[in-house]
Image (tube, rainbow, N blue to C red):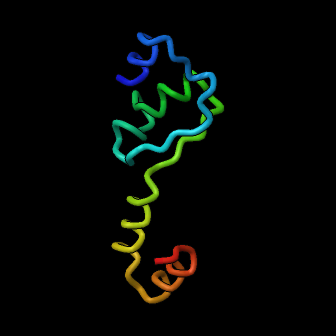
């Protein structure tokens, strides 16, 4: 796991302020995920899901005209 690799190389998470991860359960899940390990080591780290996947899912599942217009107002395509 990445936290083990950090520890083996004497890299601490004390100076980590943010991390962006793919939205899989292994990365973002509530139990035993990379997010939970990182925030256990440094609770102040801001963890963000992958913006590209979030926008893709919003476009895929929000196909109504109302949602599409709202999405386009937030993102320049």
* Identity of the residue drawn at 55% across and 23% down: 40
Query: On screen, 24 above or below 68?
Result: above
* Identity of the residue drawn at 60% across and 25% down: 42
Q: Quadrant of the N terminus?
A: top left
* Identity of the residue drawn at 60% across and 34% down: 45
Q: Based on the displayed image, in which of its 4 quarters is residue 59 positioned?
A: bottom left
Residue 27 appears at what percent x and percent y?
39, 38
Residue 25 appears at what percent x and percent y?
35, 41
Q: Quadrant of the C terminus?
A: bottom left
Residue 76 appears at what percent x and percent y?
51, 76
Taking depth in this image into account, of 11 and 65 the one nearest to the observer is 11
Tell which residue pokes out farthest to the bottom in this image. 65
Taking depth in this image into account, of 49 and 64 the one nearest to the observer is 49
Taking depth in this image into account, of 66 and 17 the one nearest to the observer is 17
Q: Based on the displayed image, in which of its 4 quarters is residue 55 positioned?
A: bottom left
* Residue 67 appears left or right of 32: right
Tell which residue pokes out farthest to the right in this image. 44
Q: How many marks?
A: 0
């Amino acid at each position: 796991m990445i936290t083990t690799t950090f520890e083996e190389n004497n890299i601490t998470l004390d100076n980590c302020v943010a991390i962006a991860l793919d939205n899989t359960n292994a990365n973002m899940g509530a139990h035993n995920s990379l997010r939970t390990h990182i925030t256990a080591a440094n609770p102040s780290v801001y963890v963000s899901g992958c913006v590209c996947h979030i926008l893709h899912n919003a476009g895929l599942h929000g196909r109504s005209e109302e949602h599409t217009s709202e999405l386009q107002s937030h993102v320049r395509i």
